[in-house]
Image (tube, rainbow, N blue to C red):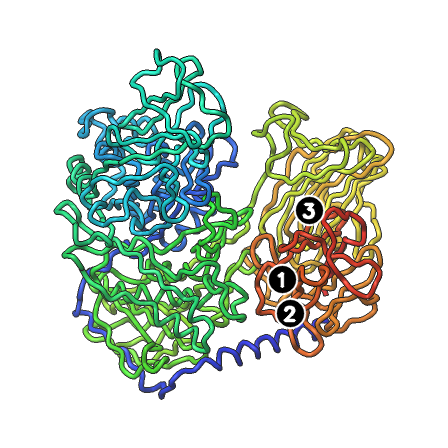
């Protein structure tokens, strides 16, 4: 088997070499490439705020704020650690079009008592405001290194007073000065736990107010700038489903229908409203405004507040009640201040702030505007089909404009952008987080560093998830710089250039001259580029060199003028095995930064720069001396973090919140105050007629780790299974409690005794697990009972822990009081060898196989490539099933509704829902394979073919299991 795996790896490597070699370059003699720098030729300071991120508030800041924690919520440490690791210097709030419907006042104070925010996308439903200003600034301050934020003012939602109040809350001293009058917002900030001002310098007025996809009060640049009136008619929809002519609830803009209750209150989307301009309709009937409903009598009357846009209906005695189900629409003329007026009010509170203006209204910027906002996204979908796609992408990575309109540019969003970009087949659908994207980011930042006119630049985006409560599907999860997973985060390849610049580039940019660089795309992309800098006292000189060539290393001559370096220099290199390589939760450092020292540095020497790499060389001046030891890059945070579940903060009689629970009949799993109020546990109750499963999922673990449990059973004669599984549901370490004994199951399926157990007695069960050799030790109450017990099945990672009660006969309970994991080693990433599986059918024992482009079954006696399947993750829940085949052709499992739900094979370049699948646990190590497009199960009914059946079929003919080959 090892030989076959090795042969497959060699074939894979050969394929990668052939593909990357096919990307054309124009080669020149390596000896002709030369880089020259002059330490005295300082051009400008490099702004530390070029290395910022755009961050959004949905999903608790995409788990930046952990609302699932016990107590009052807290920053999610893995997100903090990963963001610190990449050196983030500025974080934008609220980030993107989601800002435009946010009321900033609902983002301060106790997150549990706030009103929700309104989603600007989809049906405009409310979403949780738990990641507000308070939480955001805690996050920013946790990053250290003088990290700061850009705050976006929602121009749709504020007037001059509210915009100025915002500045007062963030920037004013808590000394009673109350510069904007009214509420003392600095005092309120102190009450919220932050005595000192946040001192935010840069403020942005709205997000992308030129776009019809977002909420805005006007689409005219001059009105955005200088204010004015805008009229909407009843029932009017603007742009992308923006229902400006509908009445809305204060905290829910998706609701437009009367519920038939008395004293209903509704609002216009925007305010204030020009007096007398409103038309309110219930259904098709226009109602009449009165000044006071109190004595109005029966009639179609309403009250209207022109400042807030509030509409109040009657109680049936004074003013009729709108009939249940009737849609309420409203026409009006809104009168809004422009961005220039908002800026003047904000600067009256703090004259030192810098205010950023939408570039689309650049010709109307007043004296209080300091900067204009640009979002230089590089759209790539149209170039991904060409043979030179890699270099075409790099050719877009540049920013050359300087100060337009006589103002400073602020790039509050930038990056590669296209919805759900999957890229050519070599990227396996992950181009946006690949090494290609990493080199794109590095090249773009090169251009900003050389440009010198940009102080703030924020890459879109810090992180995201597959589930987005803003209902906006245009943000690919791969586009995040970091990726939160179940028990931690990992750092995407596209984030690593930020760490290189932040830690390996000094503050003073010096001119860098390159001669003889090879090029691609007929000279459009220079394959060797560099930026250089010196520190303030010129004792350190840094050169960062990018070699964009997809296949070739280059030896480059480096010449340092006016700098005599010490012979030892520090070298950091960012690279992966190919331009296609990316990180994920299993293989989190396939693209990484490595470090070494060289001992031949001089003012003129040669260095070989690897293909598709970013390399930073730090030189120390001879008389300046070296650090006490060379500085090497720290390792990226592991995606898996240790956790402990004690259940002590959970509510009694509810399901354990960190577990998935499945049960039959009256069987259940609930939190109980057992053994004590202060020491709770999960009780699995089995009535003898069914089973109860509790499953704790986490980020896949490799290498070595320990797991501790504290357990008790009320009847030691009954059966409880305890096992660990991979992401296919295959059981690894497997134990059970039965007949007064704790047992483990070996690789032959035999049960072996570990020790005796007694009913109603607590036991501490500790397992030391070595996944690399599929063995584990068992300790019971700190006493070693078994050494090197074998896994039931060989697996290369562990994704979940599961406890299952198994009747029959009578009621009994099993208690879990503690579950803790401890990852014991840093080297948790296995070799990059794709996992290959056989897929076994439960009711027949047959194996799923390919037959040309068809799929059928064979008895489990063959070991040909036709029964070898690769399970390739598409995202956190969906995957592709690729068949290796016997002709070196890889085909993908597919179904279409056109032919009786038939299942066949198609080329692996397909990536739609027809080739996406999901595993549904079916118990005891078996799973159902669900088709994403149809929701139906993969099924075999005894004929020669495989097809799909409705998901209400629960028989064994829809159950499968993956067996690692």
Numbered circles on residues, count? 3
Q: Name the residue under label 1.
A: 915
CA separation, marks 1 and 3?
39 Å
CA separation, marks 1 and 2?
9 Å
CA separation, marks 2 and 3?
44 Å
Mark 1 and mark 2 residues within 8 Å of each other at the beta carbon? yes
Q: Position of residue 885 (x, y in %)?
A: 70, 73
The label shown at residue 767 is 3
Q: Name the residue under label 2.
A: 906
Q: Residues within 10 Å of mark 3 (few under 14, many from 20)?
A: many
Which quadrant holds the C terminus?
bottom right
Q: Vertically, is 152 above or below 18?
A: above
Please tell me in which quadrant of the rendered image residue 392 appears.
bottom left
Q: Name the residue rendered at 46%, 41% in the picture.
A: 123
* Identity of the residue furthest to the top in this view: 295
SS of the residue under disc 2 = strand
Q: Work out whether residue 799 or residue 479 is closer to the camera in this orientation and state it.
A: 479
Q: Position of residue 657 (x, y in %)?
A: 60, 35
């Amino acid at each position: 088997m090892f030989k076959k795996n090795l042969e497959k790896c060699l074939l894979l490597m050969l394929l990668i070499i052939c593909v990357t070699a096919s990307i054309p370059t124009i080669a020149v003699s390596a000896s002709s490439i030369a880089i020259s720098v002059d330490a005295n030729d300082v051009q400008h300071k490099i702004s530390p705020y070029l290395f910022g991120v755009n961050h959004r508030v949905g999903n608790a800041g995409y788990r930046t704020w952990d609302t699932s924690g016990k107590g009052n919520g807290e920053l999610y440490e893995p997100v903090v650690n990963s963001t610190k690791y990449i050196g983030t210097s500025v974080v934008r709030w609220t980030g993107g079009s989601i800002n435009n419907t946010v009321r900033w006042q609902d983002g301060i104070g106790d997150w549990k008592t706030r009103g929700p925010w309104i989603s600007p996308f989809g049906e405009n439903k409310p979403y949780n405001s738990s990641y507000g200003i308070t939480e955001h600034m805690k996050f920013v301050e946790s990053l250290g290194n003088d990290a700061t934020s850009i705050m976006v003012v929602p121009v749709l939602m504020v007037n001059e007073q509210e915009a100025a109040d915002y500045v007062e809350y963030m920037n004013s001293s808590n000394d009673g000065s109350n510069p904007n009058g009214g509420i003392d917002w600095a005092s309120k900030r102190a009450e919220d736990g932050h005595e000192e001002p946040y001192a935010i310098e840069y403020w942005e007025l709205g997000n992308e107010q030129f776009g019809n996809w977002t909420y805005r009060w006007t689409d005219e640049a001059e009105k955005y700038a200088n204010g004015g009136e805008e009229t909407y008619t009843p029932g009017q929809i603007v742009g992308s489903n923006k229902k400006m002519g509908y009445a809305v609830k204060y905290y829910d803009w998706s609701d437009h229908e009367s519920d038939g209750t008395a004293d209903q209150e509704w609002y216009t989307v925007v305010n204030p409203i020009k007096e007398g301009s409103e038309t309110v309709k219930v259904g098709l009937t226009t109602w009449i405004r009165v000044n006071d409903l109190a004595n109005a009598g029966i009639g179609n009357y309403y009250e209207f507040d022109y400042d807030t846009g509030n509409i109040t209906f009657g109680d049936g005695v004074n003013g009729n009640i709108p009939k249940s189900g009737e849609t309420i629409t409203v026409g009006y003329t809104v009168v809004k201040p422009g961005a220039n007026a908002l800026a003047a009010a904000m600067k009256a509170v703090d004259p030192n702030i810098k205010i950023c203006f939408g570039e689309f209204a650049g010709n109307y910027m007043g004296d209080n505007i300091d900067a204009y906002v640009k979002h230089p996204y590089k759209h790539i979908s149209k170039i991904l089909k060409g043979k030179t796609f890699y270099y075409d992408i790099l050719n877009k990575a540049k920013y050359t404009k300087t100060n337009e309109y006589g103002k400073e540019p602020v790039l509050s969003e930038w990056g590669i952008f296209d919805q759900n970009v999957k890229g050519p087949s070599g990227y396996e659908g992950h181009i946006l987080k690949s090494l290609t994207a990493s080199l794109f980011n590095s090249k773009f930042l090169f251009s900003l560093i050389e440009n010198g006119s940009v102080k703030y630049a924020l890459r879109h985006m810090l992180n995201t998830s597959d589930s987005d409560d803003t209902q906006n599907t245009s943000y690919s999860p791969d586009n995040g710089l970091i990726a939160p997973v179940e028990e931690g985060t990992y750092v995407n390849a596209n984030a690593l250039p930020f760490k290189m610049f932040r830690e390996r580039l000094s503050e003073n940019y010096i001119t860098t001259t390159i001669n003889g660089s090879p090029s691609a795309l007929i000279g459009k992309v220079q394959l060797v580029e560099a930026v250089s800098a010196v520190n303030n006292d010129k004792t350190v000189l840094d050169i960062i060199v990018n070699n964009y060539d997809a296949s070739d290393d280059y030896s480059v001559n480096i010449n340092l003028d006016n700098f005599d370096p010490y012979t030892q220099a520090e070298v950091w290199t960012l690279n992966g095995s190919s331009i296609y390589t990316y990180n994920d939760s299993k293989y989190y450092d396939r693209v990484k930064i490595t470090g070494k020292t060289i001992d031949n540095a001089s003012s003129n020497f040669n260095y070989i720069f690897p293909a598709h790499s970013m390399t930073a060389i730090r030189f120390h001046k001879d008389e300046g001396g070296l650090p006490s030891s060379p500085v090497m890059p720290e390792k990226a945070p592991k995606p898996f973090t240790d956790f402990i579940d004690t259940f002590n903060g959970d509510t009694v009689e509810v399901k354990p919140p960190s577990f998935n629970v499945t049960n039959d009949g009256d069987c259940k799993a609930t939190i109980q105050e057992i053994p004590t109020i202060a020491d709770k546990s999960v009780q699995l109750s089995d009535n003898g007629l069914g089973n109860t499963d509790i499953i704790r999922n986490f980020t896949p673990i490799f290498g070595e780790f320990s797991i501790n449990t504290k357990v008790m059973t009320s009847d030691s004669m009954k059966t409880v299974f305890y096992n660990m599984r991979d992401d296919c549901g295959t059981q690894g370490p497997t134990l059970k409690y039965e007949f007064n004994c704790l047992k483990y199951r070996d690789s032959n399926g035999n049960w072996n005794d570990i020790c005796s157990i007694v009913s109603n007695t607590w036991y501490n069960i500790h397992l030391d697990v070595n996944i690399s050799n599929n063995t584990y030790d068992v300790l019971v109450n700190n006493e070693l009972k078994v050494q090197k017990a074998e896994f039931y099945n060989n697996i290369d990672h562990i994704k979940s822990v599961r406890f299952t009660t198994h009747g029959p006969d009578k009621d009994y309970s099993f208690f879990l009081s503690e579950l803790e994991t401890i990852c014991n080693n840093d080297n948790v990433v296995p070799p990059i060898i794709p996992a290959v599986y056989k897929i076994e059918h439960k009711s027949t024992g047959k194996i799923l196989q390919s037959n040309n482009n068809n799929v059928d079954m064979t008895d489990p006696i063959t070991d040909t490539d036709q029964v070898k399947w690769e399970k390739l993750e598409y995202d956190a829940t969906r995957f592709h099933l690729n068949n290796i085949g016997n002709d070196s052709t890889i085909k993908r499992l597919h179904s279409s509704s056109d032919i009786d739900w038939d299942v066949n094979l198609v080329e692996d370049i397909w990536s739609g829902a027809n080739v996406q699948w999901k595993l549904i646990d079916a118990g005891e190590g078996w799973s159902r394979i669900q088709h994403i497009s149809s929701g139906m199960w993969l099924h075999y009914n005894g004929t020669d073919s495989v097809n799909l059946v409705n998901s209400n079929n629960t028989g064994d003919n829809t159950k499968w299991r993956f067996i690692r080959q």
